[in-house]
């Protein structure tokens, strides 16, 4: 192997190693209202582990994961967990409120849009869940439904 190829290979390996060690990206801030007018601002939740969950009422995998999320929220809220559900329903509260009346959720729900989804790197599919650490950095992103057990493991690892 020529020396130049060895140098290039070592440089590539070092850049990959350095890329893995780079700190997590800060989670984009948002300030959105719940249906009762309470403002949820992500930066004011610093100091807690925050789950940011993009979902919609018409999405079967989203609806399937909510009961597990509510159970984990009840179990870990006192330990510093917060969940914010960001509904992406086109009809906004006109679509979400009737669904919530039939399917109560114990964590805050707000309405998001394409602009917010873009701030989070674009949402490829829903549900999409971000785990945000106590410093406000994104620890992980999960596309697709998460079981209660998987969700609890994510939360315990972040707390």
Image: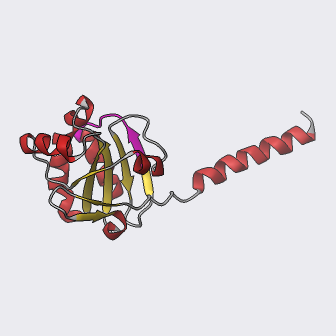
Please state the extent of the stretch shown in magenta in the rendering.
140-148
Residue drawn at (78%, 45%) of the image = 10
Judge by depth and name the residue closer to the eye, 105 or 73. Answer: 105
Pinpoint residue 11: horizontal percent, then vertical percent.
78, 48
The reply to whether the magenta stretch includes residue 105 is: no
Image quadrant occupied by the N terminus? top right
In this figure, which colouring scheme has been used for the structure? Answer: secondary structure
Q: How far across and how far down the image is residue 41, in percent?
A: 32, 65
Q: Position of residue 141 (x, y in %)?
A: 42, 45
Q: Pick whichever, 159 or 58, lies toward us.
A: 58
Give the quadrant of residue 92: top left
Residue at x-position 41% and y-position 64%: 136
Magenta highlight on residue 142: yes
Q: Is residue 158 left or right of residue 107?
A: right
In the image, what residue occupies the spot 25% across and 65% down?
A: 39
In the picture, the quarter occupied by the C terminus is: bottom left
Q: Quadrant of residue 36?
A: bottom left
Q: Is residue 10 left or right of residue 116?
A: right
Q: Is 84 rendered above or below residue 88?
A: below
Residue placed farthest to the left in the image? 102
Front residue of 128/30: it is: 30
User: How many labels, in total?
Assistant: 0
- For image coordinates 44% across by 55% down, the residue present is 138
1 up-or-down from 4: above or below? above
């Amino acid at each position: 192997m020529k020396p130049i190829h060895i140098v290039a290979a070592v440089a590539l390996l070092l850049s990959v190693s350095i890329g893995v060690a780079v700190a997590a990206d800060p989670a984009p801030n948002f300030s959105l209202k719940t249906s009762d007018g309470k403002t949820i601002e992500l930066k004011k939740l610093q100091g807690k582990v925050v789950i940011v969950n993009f979902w919609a009422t018409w999405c079967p995998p989203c609806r399937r994961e909510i009961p597990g999320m509510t159970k984990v929220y009840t179990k870990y809220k006192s330990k510093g967990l917060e969940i914010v559900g960001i509904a992406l329903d086109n009809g906004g509260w006109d679509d979400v409120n009737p669904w919530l009346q039939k399917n109560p959720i114990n964590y805050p729900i707000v309405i998001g849009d394409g602009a917010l989804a873009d701030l989070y790197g674009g949402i490829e599919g829903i549900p999409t869940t971000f785990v945000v650490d106590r410093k406000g950095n994104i620890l992980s992103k999960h596309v697709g439904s998460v079981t209660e057990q998987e969700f609890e493991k994510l939360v315990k690892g972040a707390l």
